[in-house]
Image (cartoon, coloured by chain):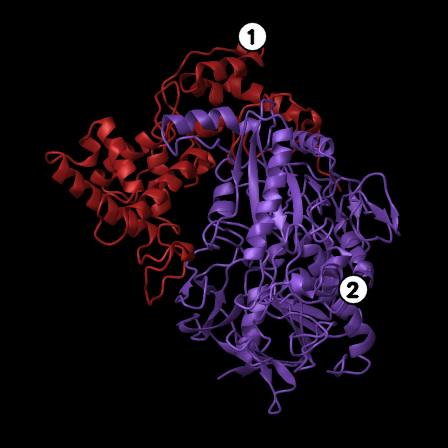
Amino acid sequence: MTTANKPQNGIAGDLLSRARTLVSSTGWLSDDPCLLGRRRFVQGALALPVVLALPACSSDAQSPTLARTFFSPNEYRFIEAATARLIPGDANDPGALEAGVPFFIDRQLSGPYGRADRWYMEGPWASGSDQQGYQLRETPAQLYRKAIAGIDAHCRDRFDGKVYAELSAEDQEHVLHDLDENKIELEEFPSQAFFSMLWQNTQEGFLSDPMYGGNRNFAGWKLIGFPGPRYNYVKEITRYGEPYTLPPVGLMGRDGMRMLS
Amino acid sequence: MAKRLRPVDVVLVGFGWTASIIAQELTEEGLQVLALERGVDRATVPDFATTHIQDELKYAVRDGLFQAPVRETLSFRNSRDQTALPMRNLGSFRPGAGVGGAGVHWNGQTWRFLPDDFVLRSHTEERYGADFIPEDLTIQDWGVSYEELEPYYDRFEYLCGVSGLAGNLGGTRQSKGNPFEGARSRPYPLPPLERSAGSLMFDKAARELGYHPFAAPAANASRPYKNPLGVQMGQCTYCGFCEWFGCGNYSKASPQSTILPVLLKKDNFTYRTGCDVTRVVLDSTGKKAKGVLYRDLQGQEYEQPAQLVILCAFAHHNVHLLLLSGIGTPYDPASATGVTGRNYAYQITSSVEVFVDELINPYMGAGALGQAIDDFNTDNFDHGPEGFIGGGYIALWTTGGRPILQHHLPKDTPKWGAGWKKAMAENYLKSVSISTHGSVVSHRQAYLDLDPTYKDIYGNPMLRLTFDFHDNDYRMSDFLTAKAEGIAKAMGPRSINVKNRKKPYSIVPYQTTHNTGGAVMGDDPRTSVVNRYLQSWDVPNVFVVGACNFPQNGGYNPTGTVGALAYWAADAIRGMYLKNPGPLVQA
């Protein structure tokens, strides 16, 4: 059996669906031109009928208002500041903040990943060699909580009582480098252990399906050119060197804002 | 107190590829067969539906389909002077759990080992002399030949609908295909998958260098296919979500897409999920198995009596059960005696990332869509000047372009920040990776035993892995990597990034789930756990099946050989054991 002709996933289906999206003005174009890089937007727009292109930038009326569940306000300020340095951006060239990465991390830490539900977390504990992998007692959620407190304490000592989020962008970058190089003493674990987890989770939030709260408006996927989890490239696989022009789609649709609740 | 259950003829531990094959075969004999699976039940619908399976975070990053260390893991150290510590989360390898086992989340790269692989020690001694083999290597012949296994490779390939081109039909070289492969009795059931842009670039470069590139064999159906059991498979759509995912399109071969639709309808087959088998129960002589002990998710213990016990779990788990059950003498590295846990091996991999000007569209792919050369595998080239044993294939796979784990960045890219972001935008669509897939020798210091400190959730000693690659393999891998680098340069790239395998082995970064050995097959009970039919030398009504049987690892993905061995053992049970239960080979 072959299901290669599923209408909703074929090229014709994509075009049809995109046209519907544009007409209803609730989809990707209504939000996206404000967030897309100019070059990429022009590329996208060229593929469309002229009459439908270049809608006005609307306000962010589609934004969900799901509440944060893990970080305290101070912790969240740290995460926003740090991820903004890790993947910088602005409205025209979205980075971690615009893509919702802090919110993504918050949700991950309050769930099974944050609790290390799948990990073996019994003693005895020993530090071991690098080759033996993660040997800390802390779950990811505990690691974040302790690390942020430790880093803010370090910053207060070093920068006239300011916490990390209050530092200049340059100082914030220095602190991140120091964390990565184990130059900041945290009480219970090497700072690099936290940095590598933070950087990994930041990339996840930028590049995973928007239904997890990050990659909003497909910011990460648009940056690199990934069209999302599409189903069928039987025709396209042999169109060597040709760009794939359809806009990104997520598992929950095309607006890039819908989340798992 | 274990609750005693109604006896069955055959109990299978695990319900992945090998158990599915053996269950299908033995139920044909009218036997009552039961499979005990530690994980959950899984079916193509609803578990692999394309409406949710194409989720990189859930499945590839958060390990959705894999073994959870909280329930089962092992401890690890590089060498005997270290203290082994638990693998607390998955890294280097990712065994499956659940119905279908790792056969659900594999890529479908379906190779045959070469004829020389099965006689590695005798062939090496014959061609290069006994002194060529370092003293601490414990490589050995398999006790089964390629020619004997050929019909069983064939059965597995036709079960799966493998897409490929024969290079050697009945001893006659074909103009396409792998010219180094062993003779096959008939062509692959399906033609190769469509070539990706990267495959063609690799093919051209390898050809210019005088190598012999070919379309790698793929258990991803290039056309609609009905297998010999009558199960229908669909044409692959190149969605790029094979590896780490189930296939919702019935295109990637798995137990679910090839056997279970037939097996699950049989009255004389059943299976139970959430069952952790903890022992093979032996009678007072220690030479006969009475059945197995297992726990369900409530912790209730059961004794399942059976005439025949077949261990079909992942390599580690089979060996763990043998050690816990006292089957075979545990291997002792100090005296180099004993067999159970001996000759653990793995796979040594490296890669060369290639940054090109052409648009690659890497997300259009399939798990086993690739172009490979076999010029440097096993003994396809003269090892005399190189001074090492073994080899591997070099391939450019187009398995997909999942953004979190499958992006490539040039060597000098900043780790994070604006420079990282710029490099992501510039390189994602214009990069490929060439990988080398090297064999691993078995040696005296690589083995599995029981950990003296760490316990599993039932209070049993955890399995302990002591492993580093032998120096032979680091040298072999560097050799392969240099060849891969040559191909990369011939592709006319903007830049390349050579990633050699670094000493020592680390359990952290993903490498492969091709763990082998620990219950190896052979002709001599002093150096093998099972005979050539995968039957325990010590307890003849116990068979052990899987990559744990490999005396050392070849330079290929193991599933093709694992499938062939499962059919081989099933045939021995059907044709010989059932007629006359007892040892099939006299020690």
Q: Check the image and report above or below for B199 versus B96.
A: above
At label 2, counting other C-alpha atoms closer than 10 Å, the crowd grade (few under 14, some 14-19, many 20 or more) is some
Chain hosting mark 2: B
Q: Are marks 2 and 1 on the same chain?
A: no
Residue A156: x and y, percent?
13, 38
Residue B313: x and y, percent?
60, 66
User: What amino acid is found at the position of numbered circle 1 in the picture?
Assistant: Val
Question: Residue B145 got which mark?
Answer: 2
Q: Between tags 2 and 1, which lies in front?
A: 2
Query: Quadrant of the rendered structure where residue A107 is?
Result: top left
Q: In terms of secondary structure, where does tag 2 sit?
A: loop
User: What amino acid is found at the position of numbered circle 2 in the picture?
Assistant: Ser
Residue B49: in sight, yes or no?
no
Residue B73: in sight, yes or no?
yes
Q: Which chain is red in the rendering?
A: A
Q: Is residue B117 left or right of residue A51?
A: right
Chain hosting mark 1: A
Residue for point 87% across, 53% down: B185
Report the Cα–Cα distance between label 2 and label 1: 67 Å
Question: Residue A50 got which mark?
Answer: 1
Residue for point 79% across, 45% down: B225
